[in-house]
Image (cartoon, rainbow, N blue to C red):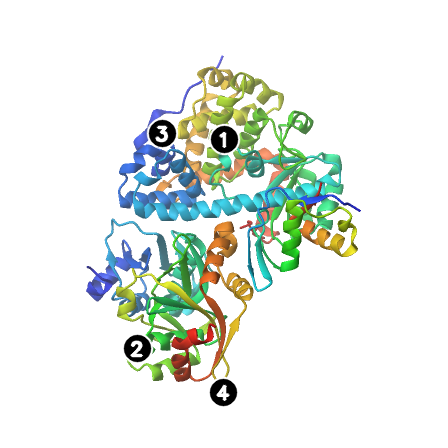
Amino acid sequence: MLTVGTLSPAALRARLAGPGLRLRTGRFTTCLRGDIPSLAAGIAQLYPDYPLLGEQDFADFHLQLQRPCNGRRWLRPQVDLLYDGRRVFRPLPLAQALPMFEWGLNWCVSSRAHRYLIVHAAVLERGGRALVMPAPPGSGKSTLTAALAGRGGWRLLSDELTLIDLDSGLVVPNPRPVSLKNQSIDVIRAYLPQAVLSPAVQDTQKGTVAHMRAPADSVARADECALPGWIVFPQYVAGAATSIEALPRATTFMELAGNSFNYSILGANGFHAMARLIEQVRGFRFRYSALDEALDALPRLDDFAA
Amino acid sequence: MTLAWRITPGQSLLHRCWDGQVVLYNDASGATHLLDQATLDFLHALRDGSVEPAELADPALQDLLRRLQFLYLVQPC
Amino acid sequence: MKRWTPCPDWMTLLPNLPLLLRALRAPEQLTTLPPAGWDLLLRQAESANLLATLHALLAERGLLDAILPAARAPLAWADVMAQRHRQATYWEIRLIGQVLEGLGLPLLLLKGAAYAAAGLPPAAGRLFSDIDVLVPEQQLPQVEAALMMAGWAGQQHDAYDQRYYREWMHELPPMQHVQRQTLIDVHHTILPRTAAQRPDPRLLRAAARPLAEPAGAAVLAPLDMVLHSATHLFADGEFDKGLRDLWDLHCLLGHFGATEAGFWDELPARARALQLQRFMYYGLRYSVALLGTPVPPATLAALAPDGPALPLRVLMDALFLRALLPHHASCRGRLAPLADFLLYVRGNWLRMPPWRLARHLFHKAFISPKKPRQAVA
């Protein structure tokens, strides 16, 4: 099977600058265009394992990153994100082209893919069961996710968008680079020396941002769904002992709905999907400060489910 | 004071109940409400016709009915 | 006596039509469309706000299982969104109805809200934005006050914009609900006060048809609904959503033509009674040309005298047959921006006399900062 990594750097740049690079990420296919060196380098570094499609193949999403033609091009270069030729967001500094693609593709999935209940949460799999971790920014979720995927023995399904199939109730993988912010970049560099990280980009709206390449195994097994196993709301508190607190089911329901992109769009089907999930799975609040302790405790969540 | 109430037509009272707490889907507005068991029991009783009109005169129930009416779950009939 | 002359073949010959139009006219041909074709079609459909409509059309014809499997997913996603829009619209209609009920006014719905409430074909696969209602002019102040009491607020408009709407246009400035962020447009007639045509809103209200559900709601009579649809489209100056509006008209014509006795015979006379015959002429002309609407030749012949003289008709064909195509990069020829501009000027011309138009355009260009309207989700 052809992957993005089989393209030479020149061929990759040519596709991006011309007809578009078509690639598959989990259930979705994207046509990406953009004649920007940092974007091409970032794709080459983070997406070598992803299936490569041909020019005549169907793509779900159509994204373009382009430099607006104005006087700012020389003094403060910018980049625009377009969906099929239509501008969707405000332009950003050119240096943020790669993060902009990541956020743009997340936006495509979370605002359109209404075959799934889409929760703003990281999700990993172990023994066929999925650990869903919703968390607001700053909760340490991404650091924890990268650690669990890189060293904890969990398969990464997604770091941002948990997809629950409305028909089957299974968690559908959406493996993509893990987005790391500020201190967590250095934490993960130290904790996972083998990890491949894109160059850090500063002064974004989320602070300093870098992306960690998803493990090859995650990408290769993107077709393997998982049964929902646990819902964990992580909270990093400096110096805190690791603690787990089981939550009432109704509370978990409402919190998960509040963390969902499209619960309110799915109507009664969304209610049914959420209810089925909550019936199968317990919710927990998880407080931690030491990554090693967290990695040790999470596989033993069933002990707390009683 | 209105003493004849019913579940608003079109509301299926789709819900789940866990440990005395209820999540209920509102078919009209698309919202999901967090209620207690007692309120759900009352809605079911109203639907099944097992609430006496005289009971509805209770000020606390009148207050509840007004709040449920605002959510379009019940209406005077 | 002018005869009906259809649009020139070279402009509307089937292979030249954009893929989206060919798909809407003959969806059964989509079973053999290759992946690259679907890629283009779905992009055109989305840009024209017709993606969920395409899904509804394929579902209605039993074709969903016969098309490219990869294309089914995005079509189904769009359908979910359309269902949610419909639910939200019904809900909004109920809440607005409660406000107007308090004033003893019927809830006379227009456009998308009317299609949704009455379950008419254009409602299938529709993404709704504002709710449009028609109220008597003398009750505008009470309606506005009642809406504000119930949580709708006028958006920040400068004094000029306020005057634009209240004195010259046919509607209150759009109001937005502070919590739900939904928009309502309150009309007192269907064309601006300053337009040359004066369709009498009393005639519209007198012929309105009540709905069973929600209680107190009503919609325009079929002839008037069709006339309003044509007027709304062809009296406007911007056509980026033109194909969507033309599709609505096409659906209404097909539906009422088949279900309302005497519909085709009465359409020309009603059009003239409301002074909307020119807009109806264009409506029929371009719906037939682009979407193949089955309009009886007798009706076309009856409205032929109400069309423009030959030179103007040639110009209008050239403008509308470009502007009504999907505003997608794949469908836009070199002359499309010029057609857009000329129709924009025409649209403003129709709304106000020349001296006022000049003042209005000056004000918009140099004084009013742009305030984008937000559509409801």
Going by the numbered disc 4, the residue's amino acid type is Gly
| Nearer mark to the viewer, of 2 and 1 | 2
Q: Quadrant of the N terminus of chain A?
A: bottom left
Residue A105 at what x, y percent from top left?
A: 38, 60
What residue does disc 1 label?
Answer: C249
Name the amino acid, label 2: Ala
Looking at this view, is C77 or C287 the one in front? Answer: C77
> Of residues A54 and A201, which is closer to you in this image?
A54
Marks 4 and 2, the one that precedes in the sequence: 2
Q: Earlier in the sequence, mark 3 or mark 1?
A: 3
User: For the view shown, which residue lies furthest in the top direction?
Assistant: C1
Residues under numbered marks 3 and 4 in contact, where contact means CB atoms less than 8 Å apart = no
Q: Badge 2, how many Cα within 10 Å: few under 14, some, many 20+?
A: some
Q: Nearer the viewer, mark 3 or mark 2?
A: 2
User: What's the CA distance linking mark 3 and mark 4?
Assistant: 74 Å
Disc 3 element? helix
**Residue that mark 2 sits on:** A195
